[in-house]
Amino acid sequence: MVRDTYFGETLEDPYRWMENDKVRDWLPFLKGQNEHARAILDALPGRAALLARIQRVSGDTVLTNKVQRAGGLTFIQQRPAGADNFKLFVRSGSHDRVLIDPRRSRAGGGHWSMDWWKASPDGRYIVYGLSRDGSEDSTLHVLSVTDGRVLPESIPDTQSAVPQWLDDASGFFYNQLTGTVDTPERFLDSRARFHRLGTKPEDDPILMHRGLVRGIDFEPIQMPYIVTYAGSRHVLLALTDVRPEFRLYSRRSPTCSPIGRAGLPWPTSTTR
C-alpha cells in the first residue's frame, strides 16, 4: 500500500505496485483478473450471437478518419472494407494510390500500425510513425510521395512526435521521449528537436527541454512542442500536459535561417 499526502490529505493507492511489470506477482495477477472477467462476460445470455454480428459488420464498411490537402494532393487515412488496419492513400484527380501500408512493415513479425502522419506543405513528403503489436511506441519515418521511397533516416521514441513542417519542406520540428519504455517515467522530460531531411537524426538539435532556457521553467510532465502555421512569420513553443491550461511562446520563424545546435532564442513572455 502506497500513501501520498497532498495539501494535508492522505490518499491510499493499493495498485501502485502494478506500475512495475517486473514484479513477480504482476503477470499472475493480470491473468487472474482476465480469467475472472472472461468467465463472467462469456456467460452473458446472447453474447456469442452479438459478438458474431459485430465481427461480421465491423469490417464491412470503409472507415476514413483523417484527410489532409497539401500541394494539390489529397491524403486520406482509411481502413478499406474487410481490412484490419488503416492505410494512407494519396489521391490525384480520381486515382488513389497506397502510400503507407503497415502490413508491409512486418520486419521481425508482429502486427504493425500507423500511429500518426503529416504531409509536408508542398505534398512532397510524409512524416509518419509506425509501432508494433499495439504498443504505440512509434518510430518516425519519412516517405517521398512521388516514388513511394522511404528515406534512410528513422527516429525512435516518437510516440508523441506531433511533427510540424517548415514551409519549404526542408525539415520539421518534433517531440522525442527520453524516459525508459514501460516505466512510469516514459513521458517525463521529453524534448523538442528539429530534423532537416538528409541529415543524421542523432545530430538533430535539441531546441527545448527542461532547464535549457533560463526564464522558461516547466514541470517534467509538460511536453515542449514547436508549432508552425503555413505562411506565418512566427512559430510557437507550446508547453502542454494532461491539464487544459498550457503556455505558448512566440518567435519569428526560422524557415529562412539555419537552425544550429544552440537552438532557438525564445522570449520569456507567454500566452495561456
Image (spheres, helix red, strand yellow):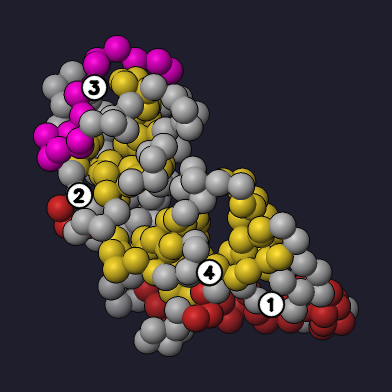
Kindly identify which residue carries mark 2.
Answer: 204
Q: Secondary structure at mark 4?
A: strand
What residue do we see at 33% from left, 26% from top? 253
Q: CA–CA distance between discs 2 and 4? A: 25 Å
Q: Which image quadrant: the N terminus? A: bottom left
Vertical order, 258 against 21 (above or below): above
Q: Amino acid at mark 4?
A: Ile
Return the mark for residue 83: 1
Horizontal arrangement in the rendering, residue 50 relative to residue 214 (left or right): right
What residue do we see at 33% from left, 46% from top? 170
Q: Earlier in the sequence, mark 4 or mark 1?
A: 1
Image location of residue 38, percent across then percent down: 65, 79
Kindly identify which residue carries mark 4.
Answer: 100
Return the mark for residue 266: 3
Q: Earlier in the sequence, mark 3 or mark 1?
A: 1
Q: Secondary structure at mark 3?
A: loop
Q: Nearer the viewer, mark 4 or mark 3?
A: 4
Image location of residue 237, percent across then percent down: 34, 29
Q: CA–CA distance between discs 2 and 1? A: 37 Å
Foreground residue among 262 and 190? 262
Question: Pointer 2 and pointer 1: residues touching (CB < 8 Å)?
Answer: no
Horizontal arrangement in the rendering, residue 44 relative to residue 30 (left or right): right
Most distant residue in the bottom direction: 109
Q: Earlier in the sequence, mark 3 or mark 2?
A: 2
Q: Secondary structure at mark 1?
A: loop
Query: What segment carries the magenta color?
Result: 258-272
Foreground residue among 269 and 134? 269
Q: Amino acid at mark 1?
A: Ala
Return the mark for residue 158: none
